[in-house]
Image (tube, grey):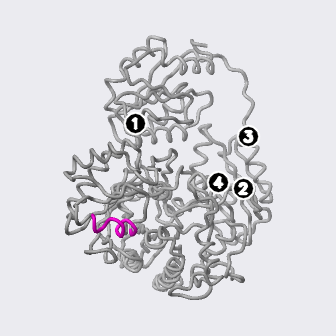
Amino acid sequence: MHNAPTASGAAPRRALLLVVDSLGVGALPDAAEYGDAGADTFGHIAEACATGAAEEGRSGPLAIPVLSRLGLVHAAAAARCAPVAGFAALPAPEAAWGHARERSVGKDTVSGHWEMVGQPVLRDWGYFSALTNSMPAELLEELARRSNVTGFLGNCHASGTQVLEDFGEEHLATGKPIVYTSADSVLQVCAHEEAFGLERLYALCAAARVLVDEYRIGRVIARPFVGRRRGEFQRTAHRRDYAVPPPPGTLLDTLTAAGGSVVGIGKVPDIFAQRGISRAVKASGLEALMQASQASLQAGGDRTLVFTNLVDFDQEYGHRRDVAGYARALESFDAMLAELLATLGPNVPGGVVLSGHTDVVPVDGQPWTTDPFRLVQRGERLYGRGTSDMKSFLAIALALVPEARGQSLIEIQNAIAARYSQAGRLGRVIWIPVGLEVRDERQKRLLDVLKNDPDLSACDSVLETPLHELKTVIRDKLAPQKEEPTAPSPLERIYLVYDQRDEDAITPIDDYLYDLGLEVKHPLFRGDEPAIRADHQAKLRVADGVLLYYGAGDESWLSRMLLDLAEQPARGRTSAVYVAAPETREKTRYRTREVDEVVKAFAGFQPELLKGFLDRLGGRRGGPNA
């Protein structure tokens, strides 16, 4: 974060998020499912350097003094539960550091970036898994017809540079674009920038974007190149990604809606389909990307986030398995980072967020020195694995947490928690370290308020205990409570959730449920967004059953509704997804464990298909079908 004084004397709030694409520090539990068992990019590069196996253009152990000082090596050692080769003695890190396990399914670029800003992808993308003849013939035939080309070359798993060597000359001779894929959910198209035409390539990729939706493919990438013969072909800076738009509500959306600014550098704007991006800056190459990032950070106004993906690490070295090249790039990046930090100055509050764009080992079954998700106090700081996340840090750094005149953040948090407690929705746990001594008068007043709060309810707790006892208290409070028998609900409430375009299509279901004596609630579609959102959340909380009608809405709409459902838990609620026309390959294969039942009704409404949903509803609630 960069806070330089403005002309008015106030410090503008700015943050820089650098994604070191593909730099991982260990393997997740599902790595083997993606052919990545034992993956540890940073550890393996460091080992190669330390053993003399990465001497091309450099020499000796990996030299990254700035990244080491910031805590990268500490994070890698903690993640792999072993020292990192070539780093025998390290000083204590000067920055906060950590490693995390992502929630998203898969390992695609889109999933990782979306999760960084608050939208994890909980269902896997589609992939073209076959190593040869990777894309279906019918897909390529339709794409050729729509794009007026005679066919395609490649159609395989390959690196971008290798397909140019293998098919570049044939492409120039025949005019056929080169298509290929990788372990990502992606369709990539190569064509000569001059002979084929840049705009023609973009139009072809836009057509492909529409066609691959049926296959749940995350991105289509246009890969223009220049050169006349093998050995001379080079990709240009005019790459363009055509990604599925993220669901609304990312940190980028929140920041821009609050009057802030998001500057996307390199491929970041395309990854988010331009959503939540205030300004896009094109740059190619590690040095140019870093220069654009620094310039955008220095020029940004108040509440500016600069978001950069350093794609060269993956594109130029990772895919090619160029260990020495990757090491050279890391050492160059380290020097550029030193220049960036020197420009910011030593007294700037906050920090620069560095992300490896991958995640690490499981929390279970590892020789950790501390329990996962347990806070540990060391000096004046609290440390923990799994206890914070990137988007929250950025949001606070950019002051998206509402501010009140004369109130600190903890006072605001306490006031909000008190309101929830008084409404009976949540209880507060206020923890004060034993023997805490404060000198600041404002802190003393706050402690007095916390200890003698007149608004404390019966479900609130004020604890002055050692830190390790806090874990037990929280666990006990979160433990399931024994339920007293309750009388059957006299009226079953069904929340029928659907896209506005399906208002007519859901009529038979609405009538059928109402005729059974059920109270059917519908989404609001008119009014301001906060009111619509609050109504939707309230109906999810009080419904005895939720039926998600998956018709005209796309997969991102359904994913958003399932997230809403998960975020509004209700004891005893029944849920189902009703998959309706139009029938697509995606819908035919649809399945999920996030609801009790999936009903597929492409031929129109059939009452018997709802029997399982209604039986569960009656059985759980003691309703009319019990």
Q: Earlier in the sequence, mark 2 or mark 1?
A: 2
Disc 1 residue type (three-letter): Arg
In which quarter of the view is residue 584 placed? top left
In 3D space, how far apart are the residues under numbered discs 2 and 1 (Cα atoms)? 52 Å
Q: Which residues are magenta?
A: 161-170
Instruction: Name the foreground residue: 405 vs 68.
Output: 68
Q: Earlier in the sequence, mark 2 or mark 4?
A: 4
Against 390, residue 378 (above or below) is: below
Disc 2 residue type (three-letter): Trp
Residue 418 shown left or right of residue 530 in the figure: right
Residue 479's disc number: 3
Q: Are marks 2 and 4 in contact (CB under 8 Å)?
A: no
- Mark in the foreground, 1 or 4: 1
Residue depicted at 50% across the width and 75% down the height: 322
What x and y, as percent, mark residue 440? 66, 71
Disc 3 residue type (three-letter): Ala
Is 580 one of the magenta-colored residues? Answer: no
Residue 535 shown left or right of residue 122 in the figure: left
Q: Secondary structure at mark 3?
A: loop
How packed mark 2 is, by other alpha carbons closer than 10 Å (few <14, some 14-19, many 20 or more), is some
Q: Earlier in the sequence, mark 1 or mark 3?
A: 3
Q: Please indicate, yes or no, whether residue 390 appears anywhere in the rendered image.
A: yes
Mark 2, residue position? 431
Mark 1, residue position? 585
Mark 4, residue position? 29
Report the magenta stretch's main SS. helix
In 3D space, how far apart are the residues under numbered discs 1 and 3 (Cα atoms)? 42 Å
In 3D space, how far apart are the residues under numbered discs 2 and 4 (Cα atoms)? 34 Å
Q: Secondary structure at mark 4?
A: loop
Disc 4 residue type (three-letter): Pro
In 3D space, how far apart are the residues under numbered discs 1 and 4 (Cα atoms)? 29 Å
Q: Are marks 1 and 4 in contact (CB under 8 Å)?
A: no
